[in-house]
Image: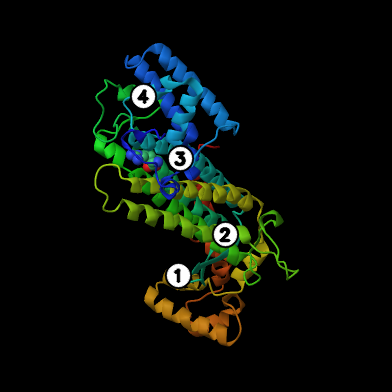
Amino acid sequence: MKLWGGRFTKPTNELVDEYTASISFDQKLAVYDIQGSLAHVEMLKECSIIPEKDAVTIANGLHSVAEKIKNGEAVMSEENEDIHMNIEKLLIEEIGPVGGKLHTGRSRNDQVALDMRLYLRAALVEISQLLLDVQKALHKQARENLDTVLPGYTHLQRAQPVLFAHHMMAYVFMFQRDMERISDSWKRVNQSPLGAGALAGTTFPIDRQYVAEKLHFDGICENSLDAVSDRDFVVEFLSNASLISVHLSRLCEEFVQWSSAEFNFIELDDAFCTGSSMMPQKKNPDVAELVRGKTGRVYGHLMGMLTTLKGLPLAYNKDMQEDKEGMFDTVDTLKGALGLFAPMIETMDVKKDNMYQAVAKDYSNATDLADYLVGKDMPFRESHAVVGQVVLHCINHNKYLMDLSVEEFQQFSPLIGRDIYDFLAPEAVVNARNVAGGTAKNRVEEQLAVARQLFQIN
Ligand code: ARG
């Protein structure tokens, strides 16, 4: 007989059992469900809602059930629909009818909301740790590449040279915003819905605060209707996860491009690449591609959840059972990607010479020539036009700015002197951008120091 079978005269259609059950995926909540039940039963005892001896029996029973689940000895069934009822059944099997007292003053509606929050809380801790590892790996590459110059791009056209360290640090700060978003979301995740009952609260003299404190929540959800129908914290997580995925995906794209023969700026370690079953020469950046590809499923889960919630009347609706798979999959997807990224970044080979040659053989110092003329009191608009002519001349004569003689320069402007070469060399161009946040070495060192403070490392 079903736990709720009292008012039914017929068994459920088998297809309905299969269709409505969530046990195939909500088993992930088992440990949190038991953790929540242990706090609940303790509270029931403290508030003298159930006798102490029953509370002790139930708590012991829950520990045995937890042990059995852990050892794979517990049999979960679709008939018992979800993790909550499966555990309750297992408990009753374990300790007898007294197990039926556990659900006093509680509904699966507040129970599942609690489990989701406990699960997410643990996931956020793990994800932040993995994100920090990625930031540290980027920071390490930055430290080791404070003298590595590469072309900086806009429109994927070479624009101005930057330090590779500067480029790595851009991602450190991107991921820092993700960290901040996660930690800000914490205060909304970390509220206890337990005690909201099915929707309206409960007739028992429970102590919601007690349970919240036992489970290390910051407080309780203030309104019982909201407590059981709120899944904003899931949406917020999926949204934050989407931004993390955007950032990872952009970095993936750079890794894929940089490791192509066309760029040849980095080589990813063999341990993070795969080969082709047909072309013996291939070494493919599969991890970077797949992380980029999996961004799609994370966005999909965000859209899915928003759409599921849209138009749901208060309070709980079965639709909300659809909150789980997307959240679980997003957590797993992020953990998978972040876990691979830190070592992949740390072990990549940065081809400094190739990067430098790319800068030496382009016109990305053209702005510096224009700025040089501004230093000789030429209005910038004018110097921009003059340098445009110089670049055109170079293109037509298969030369770069550094290849021109002073005489050639002076055909375009008599203001250009012998000192011009000191302004156009890649290092000079980089170090001239000595503005807060700029690419000059000392400015990038400042960024490294800011990040060290954020990571609380020396
Ligand atoms: N498995 C359900 C879910 O995940 C638990 C809550 C069910 N509540 C109910 N009244 N049917 O949403």
Q: CA distance from mark 2 to mark 4?
A: 42 Å
Looking at the image, tell me whether mark 2 or mark 3 is earlier in sequence order: 3
In front: 371, or 97?
97
Looking at the image, tell me whether mark 4 or mark 1 is earlier in sequence order: 4
Residue located beneath label 4 in the image: 211
Q: Nearer the observer, disc 1 or disc 2?
A: 2
Q: Nearer the observer, disc 4 or disc 1?
A: 4
Queried on whether the Cβ of the residue with tag 2 lies below 8 angstroms from ligand 1, the answer reads: no
Q: Is residue 38 left or right of residue 230?
A: right
Quadrant the C terminus occupies: top right
Secondary structure beneath disc 3?
helix
Regarding residue 72, the answer to whether it shows in the image is: yes
Residue located beneath label 3 in the image: 79
Q: CA distance from mark 3 to mark 4?
A: 30 Å
Residue located beneath label 2 in the image: 290
Q: CA distance from mark 4 to mark 1?
A: 66 Å
Label 1 neighbour load within 10 Å: few <14, some 14-19, many 20+: some
Residue located beneath label 1 in the image: 371
Identity, as a three-letter code, of the amino acid under mark 1: Asp
Residue 150: x and y in percent read: 58, 64
